Image (cartoon, helix red, strand yellow):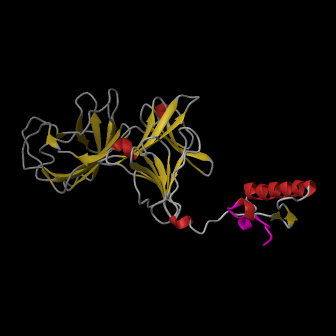
Amino acid sequence: MAKNSITDYDNTAANNTDVQSVDISEGCSPSGINNAIREVMADLADVNDGTVALTSPVASAMSVTTTLTAGGIDINGNEFILDADGDTSITADTDDQIDFKTGGSDRVTIDASGNVGIGTTSPSSALHLSGATTPEARQTFTHTTAGLSSQLQQGSTGFGLSALGSQTINFDTNGSERMRILSSGGITFNGDTASANALDDYEEGTWTPADGSGAGLTFTSSGTPYYTKVGNLVTVQAFIIVPSTSNTNTFTITGLPYNIATNSYGAGSAFNNANLGHHLVYVEPTAGVFYVRDDNNVNLTNANMSGKFVCIGVTYRAS
């Protein structure tokens, strides 16, 4: 049979009597041998280029162990062994899945969907990091020129985004900065980078209005008095009922959630059922207390408010 390709070659040299129908049998002319050698070289080049695929009818049952280079790769069935003690390898022992191992443990998995798992053999997304400790579930980015790093990490109690060192965290949409977290704390918006303009606090909570007149009155609150603090501005609201009293001390409310800033007054309004209508409420910076004034700018007394309710809303600047 004519030997037209490598798959036609016989393992016994004496049986290979031609190449591409060129006679290379014993006693053939030298020119024929030369042509045959050229044909063999061409066939081998085809194999080297991948034009001709090499197949083996016993490949599925083949177990090959061979070192390609000193300290190189061992091929053993479905595993590429990469070190001397055999515990670092690339394996394909699960159908449609590749596992990368070091020290005998799976480190990276590529599954049939193309998902990559680090620390997990069952990745649920394109890139899935998993670990029993925070460092194992952490992704680190480093700019070597600037010497800065940042991290995404899943901790035991929550998810973290960390900018290591003195740097900001910026949030962009449509190519423009929308929000920035400064390295010193505080948030700026829409490209503003000035720390003086940063929002550095937001808080909501409750407070307890108390008598500051010295008369020992006990107020009753209808509902819960609340406050909201944005930056250093505090807004408080309360609906309180004043007990019956003939005391003529100035009606005063204390218990502010934050001290008022020096040389700063707070102002708001009050409404009560004492037939006195709406009134100015102001926060005096020295004492840090509320006063309620009538239309003549005179402070109301406890007697004026006796047995009445007062609904107050005030904003002031905290120290």
Q: Nearer the viewer, residue 155 or 74?
A: 74
Task: Judge whether residue 294 can be spotted in this image.
Answer: yes
- The residue segment tinted magenta is 1-12
Q: Nearer the viewer, residue 203 or 261?
A: 203
Is 305 a magenta residue?
no
Q: Nearer the viewer, residue 170 or 263?
A: 170
Residue 6: where, in percent of width, then height? 74, 63
Residue 262 drawn above or below residue 123: above
Give the residue drawn at x 89%, y 53%: 34
Residue 169 placement, left or right of 301: right
Residue 276 drawn above or below residue 71: below
Is 11 a magenta residue?
yes
Residue 71 placement, left or right of 10: left
Residue 120 placement, left or right of 42: left
Residue 196 drawn above or below residue 132: above
Q: Quadrant of the N terminus?
A: bottom right
Give the residue drawn at x 49%, y 34%: 149
Residue 67 placement, left or right of 47: left
Residue 44: where, in percent of width, then height? 76, 56
Task: Judge whether residue 228 can be spotted in this image.
Answer: no
Residue 186: where, in percent of width, then height? 43, 37
Magenta region, main secondary structure: loop
Give the residue drawn at x 29%, y 39%: 282
Residue 14: where, in percent of width, then height? 74, 61
Residue 192 location, quadrant: top right
Q: Residue furthest front?
A: 27
Give the residue drawn at x 82%, y 63%: 19
